[in-house]
Amino acid sequence: MISVLFLWLISSGHALDVVCTLPWLGDLTERLAPEARVTVLARGTEDPHYLSPTPALMAKVGTADLYVVNGLGLELWSDRLLDGAGNPAIRPGAPGHVQASAGVPRLEVPTELTRARGDLHPEGNPHIWLDPLNAALAAKNIASGLGRIDPSGAEAYRERAAAFEAEIHERVFGADLVGFMGGALLERLARSGKLHAFLASKGLEDRLGGWLAAGRALRGRPIVFHHQSWVYFIDRFGLDLVGTIEDRPGIAPSAAHRGALKEAMTARSVGLIGVQAIYDDRLARVLARDTGARVVQLPGDVGGTDAASDYFALIDTLVAQLGS
Amino acid sequence: MVLPVAATLLMAVALGWFGLHVLQRGVIFVDLALAQVAALGATYAVFLGHEPDEPISYALGLLFTALGAVAFALARHFEEWVAPEALIGIAYVVFAAAGAVLMDFAADPHGAEKLQHLMVGNVVWVRPVEIGIIAGVAAAVGAAHFAAREGLLQVSFDPEAAAAEGRRVWLWDLCFYLTFGLVITTLVHVAGVLLIFSYLIIPAVVGRLFASSVLGRLGIAWAVAVPVSIVGIAGSYSHAAGPIIVMLLGGVLIVCLALVAVRRSAAPLRTVGGMVGAGAALTATLIAARSCDSEHDHPESEHVEIHVHDDLSPDADPATREQWYRGHEGQLPALKAALRREDDPSLRLLLAVALARGGASEGLDALAELAAGPVPFLRMEAHDRLVQVAGGGAVQGDPLAGPVTGWSTWEPPEGWRERAKELSLP
């Protein structure tokens, strides 16, 4: 009698407990699994490289069904957190562990590994989510993970991931062009850098919509960023990166670098310096004063600024701020 | 270059003088504690929502330092029960922790970075207005100290005599610590706690090693600090200047200590031999450590790896598949096999055209399927090529208006393969 009651209780489907390391992962997970309880470890206003997990967060991780991490060495604290939480179901390699960046084409994979270049990420630049096309890939990875721990819902998760991909394609290329050419072809062209030439050769440039059309001003625009987190955004939107203030990530820049940057900025007429809201913009302001450029505060993730309330708003904000 | 050198020279001169007193009074850690109190004041300002370089941060830093100075001046009263040095060391640690807790509560995303700045500073990026303030404060305090130098020196070097002469020692102490705190608070934003401590103590220690008069010690202290500042800034052009200066000062001290040890030793050659031996042992250990294999394995990553042999992996991403198909044009069996597996309609177009060019009718079948498919652009591409292959007997239809189904029942005429060779790959 008791065992029947017990079996009934555990089979009546409790809501999934999902822990995500970064805000954009939480946003995607909520879209794929609206009925799940999603906890996000880092705040959009914090630097995701560093996190001091509090006991409260560790407890959450301890009881999680699914653990979603960006990977590629971004969350240096994640392994320690998993060790401490002692939850075998979500360790790397276990079904409850999702590396969102799996299968995403990586940029800035270093050809030689040396600490002389600062805290380099040996597997490539990890800030993959700033290219919206990568968010669609990540959503598929998260949906696979959800399907592994909740097989009854696997079909629904896959469908929602496909719907998210379709929405991403429409937001990137515009609904018209996606309807005409198909998102897969457009994505392939965009990733190989041939999109604009292809559209021009077929006379389809005017039909481009979405963020790529709204971000026309970004194509070829010279810019300086504070930290090297923008390579995927730059790849998608065609910005011309003149330099980064942090010559070597994680190490204060030297006087030589400051001089070289100022020269390059003047030579290439750089009018804009982008600094993520999580960083101190003191150095950027000094450089701006030296060169007459303008400093713009950018969200690096969902919740990074008030305007970036969800993933689509994040990209909207970035396109708007960098195109102005 | 000029600005950072000016900043460090001002620091060297001002702190060299204070260092003399601090060493004599035996309150080494008062500098660290006062710098930490100043930093705590700035942290409190940040907690209230201000930036570290706003005037309010400076003002709060001064206020906190003044309170700290009063407290340290009074520490002498407890000398019977607790060494003042112990109280001061405790104060340093407690204030540092208080700063960390404040940052935690402030939930400031820059919190840790700002705290780190207060420790390390950033001498290279100093602004002209900051130099101006430092110079002004140094000049004012310098003038005041010069005027009162007799009393100050006596209270530091011989407090009993000062008391006997009727000086109010506690008042002199207070004035010393207040002016000291003012200088440190002014410097802490630019130079950081570590650099301030180094400029204060190390040149003064070297001075004590080689001279006994106040002027002699001061002269030597300045003679050490000034060249190190210039060399440090100039030599660190591509690296972090502050820590390099600290290490240079430390290095100078080690050399001076070695010199003194040899000079005062009864058997100088043996002393030199001992030092060389110790140095060699240390170097050998470091070299041996370098050749040890690292136990730390590179963590397994989950990403998909594309192997460099010729088979196309089933997990390959679209770009890789496209490359592979283009690279294997003419290898009809491989392309036919790929066509059976490929889901992406735009890649199916590529395969279909490649097969048609090679004379395989599977290519035409796939083109017909695409011409009747859901994607208008692909319908257009497929239909246009089929029209080219068909020559005169083309199926009528507008691919942009909707699916063109006629191609599925169309029979390719004789000679289609010749025309198909002219097809352009998408």
Image: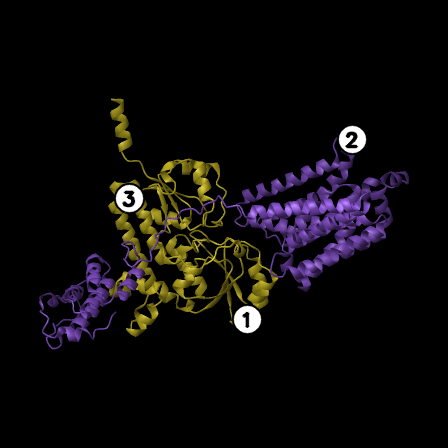
Which image quadrant for residue B416? Answer: bottom left
| Numbered disc in front, either 3 or 2 | 3
Tell me where residue B332 appears, x and y as whole percent: 20, 64
Which image quadrant for residue B3? Answer: bottom right
Disc 3 residue type (three-letter)? Gly
Tell me where residue A11 appears, x and y as whole percent: 26, 32
Observer-nearest of A89 and A29: A89
Residue position for label 1: A266
Observer-nearest of B127 and A252: A252
Residue B115 visible at all: no
Q: Residue B140's mark? A: none
Which image quadrant for residue B265? Answer: top right
Residue position for label 2: B80
Tell me where residue B183 appears, x and y as whole percent: 73, 51
Give me the residue at 30% from left, 69% from top.
A207
Q: Distance between the residues labelled 1 and 2?
A: 65 Å
Q: Residue A147's mark? A: 3
Tell me, what hue is chain A?
Answer: yellow
Q: Distance between the residues labelled 3 and 1?
A: 53 Å
